[in-house]
Image (cartoon, rainbow, N blue to C red):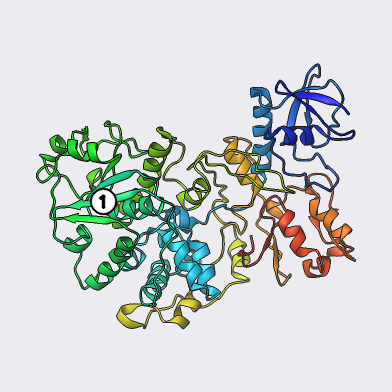
Amino acid sequence: MPKITIDNREVEVAVGATVLDAAQKLGIPIPTMCYLRGHDATTSCMVCVVKLAGASGLVPACGTVARDGMRVESSSEEVREARRAALELLLSDHVGDCVGPCQMGCPAHMNIPQMIRQIAAGDLKAAIATVKQDIALPAVLGRICPAPCEKACRRKQHDEAVSICLLKRYVADVDLQSPSPYLPPRRENRGQRVAVIGAGPAGLAAAYYLQQDGFECTVFDDHDEPGGMLRCGVPETSLPRDVLAAEIAQIQKLGVTFRLGTRVGVAISMDELRRQFDAVFIGGGELKPTDAATFGVEMSPDGIKIDSQTHATNVPGVFAGGDAVRKRRLAVRAVADGKETAESIRQYLVGGSLKAEGLGDGQAVGWALAHADDAGAVGQEQDGLKPILQVQPGKTFNSRMGKLEDGEMEIFLQSVSPEPRRKPSGPGGGYTDEEARAESLRCLHCDCRKLEACLLRRHARAYDARQTRYRANRRRLVQRTEHPDVLYEPGKCIDCGICVQIASQAGEKLGLAFVGRGFDVRVAVPFDESLAEGLKVAAAQCVQACPTGALAFRDGHRE
């Protein structure tokens, strides 16, 4: 059997095995997109290229047979740059947004499209879990948030934005009124403690995420009741106090301790806090002139000076967010600060260092991925193989389609409700069940239905690929919606041919094929038949194997 060396590590493989097989046996990560085990290698994407000693160019690892004595470089700068270029060429021809404009517009980057799909399906238990992954106080914010997400909603270009805030409020209200309101799973106690200064939106959010992540949190506040500016600065007509109390009670049920009527600097010093706790988060409201000396941190004109990516102050182990660092007094931004800082504190306490790539950007997707384990491993397990990529927590990539061209709005509208925005008639100005579902059906679903499974996005993130490096005229948006379960978007297809092979092996009468010529070649059903005719038995297999969101389940939930 041949023996080859990859990155100075020798491995023996079976006759006929490829360089990719050898690398996977060694646990060396090589990205792939057009390759699926058990199918012919098409070597079309060139994302898996490696360097062979003595050869002038690069070769695809998935299609290069391992030969005895072969020496391979898989991680040199030349190889990484070639992979990045291959990804950027694919991205230059990609038509679609990874994350919907509404999610990008939300300061907390909540997965709004997923919540809306879950409401439409009547799965409110899943919807509240989606919401509270990124919003610790959804019933509160559903009443007082100025809704920047709705300003970004693409439906607004047609008639009116989807009523996202009222839908969020609906999900949260239904949950709070249930016999057992949602509590997220809590990680086993890590044996580390965090002090949170301020029981306002930033402090409450930080405590919520840190406590469920296994850190013991104690919240200090000089008021007699928690809530901060939510209690003291928002009229009860806008935010009923029983709603605020109910959401804070859920945070307490996680095990968060509150020490109220306790002003740091008077009842307890900052030095004492740092001795008693492993980290400190300053999440109080707007600071007083004496607070700089009390906390011992550097100040900026707007408040405490922090690293904008990690929320770390100049004092090791001390972090800050919310109105303590800015004067905007926006509750949703403060809640987002609390969540983002919780991730930074987790990194600091678990690893003793911070990774600042993209923290606070795309956390709705990044936070969950980062918590798969403390190493931040992300990858696609296939045929028993371990994930082959390591992505740092918080690091993200988002493809952007840009402004819609004439006629493209109608493509989005073809499979959603044409009804105008629903006005609420429920108790206190909220939605009824029927109104919430009707409003949810107005969503255009302009996000990617395979966000986490898309290999193009995953590899672009790992290789710092830029969508705009190779500028090209964007192809028009096309959606094939005639299949009852599957949506096909040719503008996301990389022409790997995996689905063509799967359909053929499954015995599809028509199946899929490459049609067209030259640069216009695309995967389609032969004879211009519908997708429903082409994929009668292999649709689910094709969706699961597709390396991008080109083929996806219409409802997105089976990703």
Q: On the picture, is 307 further left or further right than 486?
A: left
Q: Position of residue 110 (x, y in %)?
A: 44, 57
Whether residue 388 is situated above or below residue 71 in the rendered picture? below
Q: Do we see residue 436 in this rendering?
A: yes
Q: On the picture, is 171 further left or further right than 544?
A: left
Quadrant assignment, res 288: top left
The residue tagged 1 is 218
Q: Position of residue 5 (x, y in %)?
A: 77, 23
Q: On the picture, is 139 further left or further right than 479?
A: left
Whether residue 290 is situated above or below residue 371 in the rendered picture? above
Quadrant assignment, res 90: top right
Q: Do we see residue 304 in this rendering?
A: no
Quick one: quadrant of the C terminus? bottom right
The outermost residue toward the top is: 54
Q: Position of residue 501 (x, y in %)?
A: 85, 53
Give the amino acid at mark 1: Thr
Q: Nearer the viewer, residue 74 or 158?
A: 74
Q: Secondary structure at mark 1?
A: strand
Residue drawn at x 70%, y 69% is: 485
Q: Nearer the viewer, residue 403 or 88?
A: 88
Q: How many marks?
A: 1
Count neighbours of disc 1 (C-alpha within 10 A) and say few if under 14, some if 14 to 19, many if 20 or more.
many
Quick one: quadrant of the N terminus? top right
Q: Position of residue 444 (x, y in %)?
A: 55, 66
Residue drawn at x 14%, y 38% is: 294
